[in-house]
């Protein structure tokens, strides 16, 4: 909370003056000039402790500028990395698609091989039967 101390001489009855102190627009009472100067000195010291100097402000602006530049650079690097990852993901998706196609072709080839083996097995069975029939015919 900031206190605003205003000091002024107030004309009182019988043309006498009294030091009056106002805090946020309210009269808080009369102070002697010495007490008033002491209060003002304390307030001035406290204000000096918290006061932001031009140099402090310039240093802060410089720090903010450096942070903004670092952020821009980080964003640039992030965009580049995201673009690299996008390319890698696209390559991976293409490789996956090709692998899937090759697997389909391999499965089809395997199915055809099984059909051929089945046909060969049937032909061998028929050959055995024919050989057995010929053996019987020769034996008669």
Image (cartoon, rainbow, N blue to C red):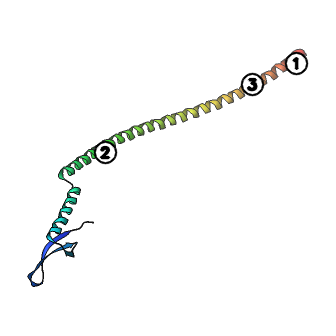
Query: Which residue occupies 26% across, 48% down?
Result: 64
Mark 2 to mark 1 CA distance (whole Å): 95 Å
According to the image, label 2 marks what residue?
71
Residue placed furthest toward the bottom: 14
Q: Are marks 2 and 1 in contact (CB under 8 Å)?
A: no
According to the image, label 1 marks what residue?
136
Query: Looking at the picture, does residue 62 appear above or below residue 12?
Result: above
- N-term-proximal mark, 1 vs 3: 3
Left or right of 109 on screen, residue 73: left
Between marks 2 and 1 in the image, the one whose residue lies nearer the viewer: 2
Query: Which residue occupies 39% across, 41% down?
Result: 82
- N-term-proximal mark, 2 vs 1: 2
Left or right of 79 on screen, residue 132: right
Query: Looking at the picture, does residue 9 appear above or below residue 87?
Result: below
According to the image, label 3 marks what residue?
123
Where residue 120 sits: x, y (%)? Answer: 72, 25
């Amino acid at each position: 909370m900031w206190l605003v101390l205003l000091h002024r001489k107030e004309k009182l009855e019988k043309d006498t003056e009294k030091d009056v102190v106002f805090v946020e627009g309210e009269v808080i009472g009369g102070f002697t000039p010495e007490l008033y100067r002491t209060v003002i000195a304390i307030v001035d010291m406290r204000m000096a402790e918290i006061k932001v100097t031009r140099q402090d402000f310039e240093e802060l602006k410089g720090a903010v500028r450096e942070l903004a530049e670092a952020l821009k650079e980080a964003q640039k690097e992030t965009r580049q990395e995201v673009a690299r990852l996008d390319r890698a993901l696209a390559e991976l998706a293409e490789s996956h698609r090709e692998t899937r196609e090759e697997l389909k072709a391999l499965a089809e080839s395997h199915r055809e091989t099984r059909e051929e083996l089945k046909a060969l097995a049937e032909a061998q069975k028929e050959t055995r039967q024919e050989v057995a029939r010929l053996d019987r015919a020769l034996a008669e």
